Image: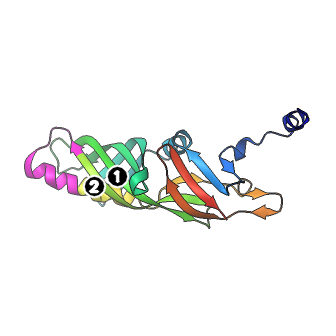
Amino acid sequence: MRLLAAASMLPAWPALAGFNFFTSEYTASREELQAQLLRRFPLQQGQGELFTVTLTDPVLGLDAANNRAAIATRVSIASPFLQPPRVGGSITVSSALRYDAGSLTLRLEQPRAEQIALDGVTGQDAVRLQRIGGAVAQEALQGQALRTFTREELTVGRKTYEIGAITVLADGIKVELK
């Protein structure tokens, strides 16, 4: 009983909510990651005057079996050579993850377009636009931040933790603290 009373007087550490220092790991929930992802969109990437690909409305998926994150977004491909000049659709890109120690950021690594559907486009035009949309989406998402830590979040007392192994779970992403 005294232990509970003493624990209730400890300060709350909301920034450390996902940290488990007993197991030396931090787990970011799907909701936390989704919120951070939404702040980084829309993304727009162009190829000169030829076309522009815009990605909006990202939804994070987690593939624990393959240790990959997936992002499903709306996609828009615009070009003065298209009729109509803008084509919409959806794209799903899966990606490995890496930690960038310099910026304290968990980033997408080698994203791969898995599924692309374009509205109202068929045949060879659809195939060409899917290739363009997929390639540009992969390029736009390469290195994109998924979760950025602060130095304060990685420091307890005099110890500052580094991020080690990254594991995709069904409901979040777990990183090893070393």
- Magenta segment, which residues? 117-131
Q: Are marks 1 and 2 in contact (CB under 8 Å)?
A: yes
Which quarter of the rendering shows the C terminus? Answer: bottom right
25 falls in the magenta region: no
Q: CA distance from mark 1 to mark 2?
A: 8 Å
Q: Position of residue 106 (x, y in %)?
A: 54, 58
Residue 120 badge: none
Q: Position of residue 135 (x, y in %)?
A: 28, 59
Secondary structure mostly seen in magenta is helix
Which quarter of the rendering shows the N terminus? Answer: top right
Q: Which residue is mark 2?
A: 134
The outermost residue toward the front is 1
Colour pattern of the rendering? rainbow
- For the image, the number of numbered tags is 2
Q: Label 2 sits on what residue type? A: Gly
Q: Nearer the viewer, residue 141 or 9?
A: 9
Is residue 137 something one can see in this rendering?
A: yes
Residue 122: quadrant of the picture:
top left
Q: Label 1 sits on what residue type? A: Val
Q: Is residue 123 left or right of residue 94?
A: left
Q: Which residue is mark 1?
A: 93
The structure residue drawn at horizontal position 85% and vertical position 38%, both measured from the top left corner, is: 7
Q: Nearer the viewer, residue 126 or 29?
A: 29
Which element is circle 2 on? Answer: helix
- Density class for disc 1 (Cα within 10 Å; few <14, some 14-19, many ≥20) is many
Residue 45: quadrant of the picture:
bottom left
Q: Is residue 29 left or right of residue 4?
A: left
Q: Is residue 27 left or right of residue 94?
A: right
